[in-house]
């Protein structure tokens, strides 16, 4: 936009008004231009002209419509000032009034100067008109600045509004992210807590398992001494002796003790399982009748089997034992009757599970409608010897045995319960990838038998056991069967005796100090390759015999006659080979 200029357009067609005015104004440093015709006047008038000086007679006879259009086209801030020179005579006054009535409506900024006028009057009128015009330009600039300011304010307001919206959006997004982060953190804390609890529980169960396994081993040694001595006494007394019924009662007590020891070993997860592919639904169908026979009046069984092939690698006998244990517990929890539900289904675990690795599992569930289990009891329910049953109604080893079987098969046991509504125990076992794959541990060879006394007499046996009671009982029983027997109380002593004189069969205890039975067996077979070996142990694990050829295992407690059959069988096999 052009700035204000002190430019005056002069329109005076008659006389010397135009040159005179031009001379006076230039002396006042006012820029001037002269229009010779009305058309030139209209052309010279633009929004940036400072003022117009004209004589009233110059407008006579002119078509003022063009001037009106030019003035109407002015910006809103513009009002061009006109200085009109007029005469004093009455006739000219009448003409002046007539002319004023013909002037355009926008031609309102008029100053009349009567002639003759002094130079001061004329220049003062023009200066006043230019001052007023300059104020218009300042107003224009101020309006423009205000408009620009308003525009900037509008832009700022729009930006601020967008900023508010963006801020609200960002706050909402950050709040949502914070909620998600808090939720993830909470989940991670809960997961960590569950993992720590699972780890603590696993460590506790592992420690209890080791302790239980040690107790079971020592218990089996005691039972072995009892069984062997009871059998020796029964052989010497004969079938008609009046003391024999008491010995038989003692035998039955040792059988119960052996069963209890087996449960302890199952919990401690050191018993040897015979693993093979198991069709879970088929196994469940096979044991339904057996489970029903264990129920009382008022109890019933419902089944919800998946119906498709659910195969796991497990010991079917142990799985059956675990399920029957759970069925018996469910029955005992419903004294007045109720419903036991057996169900199977395939489940998938992700990586968030703290107890089991991610993968596919078969869930075998046994649920009841009994009294439920309180929260404190749930924390200890798998601990050995913990029971909520009345005295004499339970050993507290059933659930511990279930826990041990499930974990030894690579799975887990889970329990959920509501007081007054019932309890659900579920065994989770990994799904087998192939039903054809047979995974089977070495099984004991069929028991041999003593053909006659001559075979026994021709068999020399070396017995190595650090427990004096057990060793002496075994030696006495073998001597009674007319075996040739030597004995040693440590692995080192026994190996020295083998070096001096090879035995036909070596009978060695597994758990001994300094040198266990497996180490003794391997060392003995280096001295005499192929030496038949009978390993006796209070544990159920045979993994330690890996790498030992021509060996059999007997789990304590066993009958002395069984030991004799094993020795004879191994010796005869060695002679045939």
Image: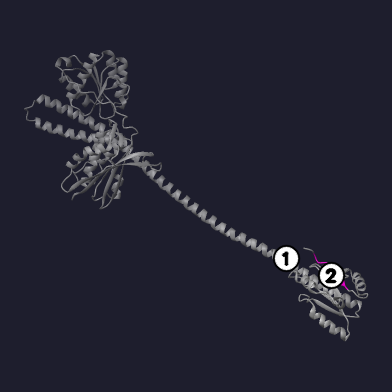
Residue under the point 23% across and 33% down: 219
Say whether marks 2 and 1 touch (CB < 8 Å).
Answer: no
Q: Residues within 10 Å of mark 1 (few under 14, many from 20)?
A: few
Q: Nearer the viewer, residue 216 or 354?
A: 354
Q: Label 2, on which residue?
A: 39
Question: Whole-percent x and y of residue 469?
Answer: 21, 26
Q: Nearer the viewer, residue 152 or 60?
A: 60
Using residue 426 as the reference point, say whether residue 453 is left or right of it: left
Specify which label sits upstream in the sequence, 2 or 1.
2
Question: Whole-percent x and y of residue 318?
Answer: 25, 35
Q: Range of the magenta residues?
A: 3-11
So how many labels did they put on this image? 2
Q: Residues within 10 Å of mark 2 (few under 14, many from 20)?
A: few
Q: What SS does tag 1 mark? A: helix
Which quadrant would residue 121 be assigned to in this image? bottom right
Using residue 444 as the reference point, say whether residue 173 is left or right of it: right
Question: Whole-percent x and y of residue 496?
Answer: 29, 16
Residue 144's tag is 1
């Amino acid at each position: 936009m052009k700035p204000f200029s002190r430019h005056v357009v002069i329109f005076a067609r008659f006389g010397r008004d135009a040159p005179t005015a031009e001379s006076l104004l230039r002396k006042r440093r006012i820029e001037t231009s002269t229009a010779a015709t009305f058309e030139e006047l209209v052309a010279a008038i633009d929004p940036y002209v400072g003022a117009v000086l004209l004589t009233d007679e110059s407008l006579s006879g002119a078509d003022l419509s063009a001037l009106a259009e030019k003035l109407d086209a002015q910006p809103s801030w513009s009002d061009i000032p006109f200085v009109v020179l007029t005469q004093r005579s009455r006739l000219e006054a009448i003409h002046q009034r007539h002319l004023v009535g013909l002037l355009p409506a926008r031609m309102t900024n008029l100053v009349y100067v009567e002639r003759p006028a002094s130079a001061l009057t004329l220049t003062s009128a023009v200066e006043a008109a230019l001052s007023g015009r300059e104020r218009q330009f300042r107003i224009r600039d101020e309006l423009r600045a205000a408009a620009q300011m308003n525009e900037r304010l509008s832009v700022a307001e729009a930006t601020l509004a967008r900023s508010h919206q963006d801020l609200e959006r960002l706050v909402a997004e950050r709040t949502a992210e914070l909620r998600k982060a808090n939720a993830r953190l909470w989940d991670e804390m809960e997961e960590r807590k569950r993992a720590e609890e699972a780890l603590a529980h696993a460590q506790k169960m592992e420690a209890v398992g080791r302790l239980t396994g040690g107790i079971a081993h020592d218990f089996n040694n005691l039972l072995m001494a009892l069984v062997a001595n009871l059998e020796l006494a029964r052989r010497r007394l004969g079938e008609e002796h009046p003391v024999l019924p008491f010995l038989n009662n003692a035998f039955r007590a040792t059988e119960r003790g052996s069963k209890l020891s087996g449960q302890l070993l199952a919990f401690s997860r050191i018993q040897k399982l015979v693993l093979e592919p198991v069709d879970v639904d088929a196994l469940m169908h096979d044991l339904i009748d057996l489970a029903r026979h264990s129920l009382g009046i008022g109890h019933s069984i419902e089944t919800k089997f998946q119906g498709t092939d659910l195969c796991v690698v497990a010991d079917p006998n142990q799985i059956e034992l675990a399920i029957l244990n759970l069925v018996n517990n469910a029955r005992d929890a419903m004294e007045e009757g109720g419903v036991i539900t057996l169900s199977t289904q395939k489940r998938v675990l992700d990586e968030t599970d703290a107890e089991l690795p991610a993968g596919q599992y078969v869930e075998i569930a046994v649920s009841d409608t009994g009294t439920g289990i309180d929260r404190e009891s749930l924390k200890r329910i798998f601990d050995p010897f913990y029971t909520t049953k009345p005295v004499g109604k339970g050993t507290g080893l059933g659930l511990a045995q279930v826990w041990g079987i499930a974990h030894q098969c690579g799975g887990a046991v889970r329990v959920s319960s509501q007081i007054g509504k019932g309890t659900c125990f579920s065994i989770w076992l990994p799904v087998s990838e192939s039903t054809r794959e047979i995974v089977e541990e070495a099984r004991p060879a069929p028991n041999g038998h003593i053909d006659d006394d001559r075979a026994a007499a021709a068999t020399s046996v070396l017995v190595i056991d650090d427990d004096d009671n057990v060793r002496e009982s075994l030696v006495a029983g073998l001597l009674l069967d007319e075996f040739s027997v030597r004995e040693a109380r440590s692995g080192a002593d026994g190996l020295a005796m083998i070096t001096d004189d090879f035995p036909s069969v070596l009978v060695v205890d597994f758990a001994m100090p300094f040198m266990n039975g497996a180490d003794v067996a391997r060392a003995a077979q280096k001295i005499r390759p192929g030496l038949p070996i009978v390993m006796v142990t209070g544990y159920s694990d045979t993994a330690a015999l890996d790498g030992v050829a021509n060996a059999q295992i007997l789990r304590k407690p066993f009958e002395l006659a069984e030991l004799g059959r094993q020795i004879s069988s191994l010796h005869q096999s060695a002679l045939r080979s």
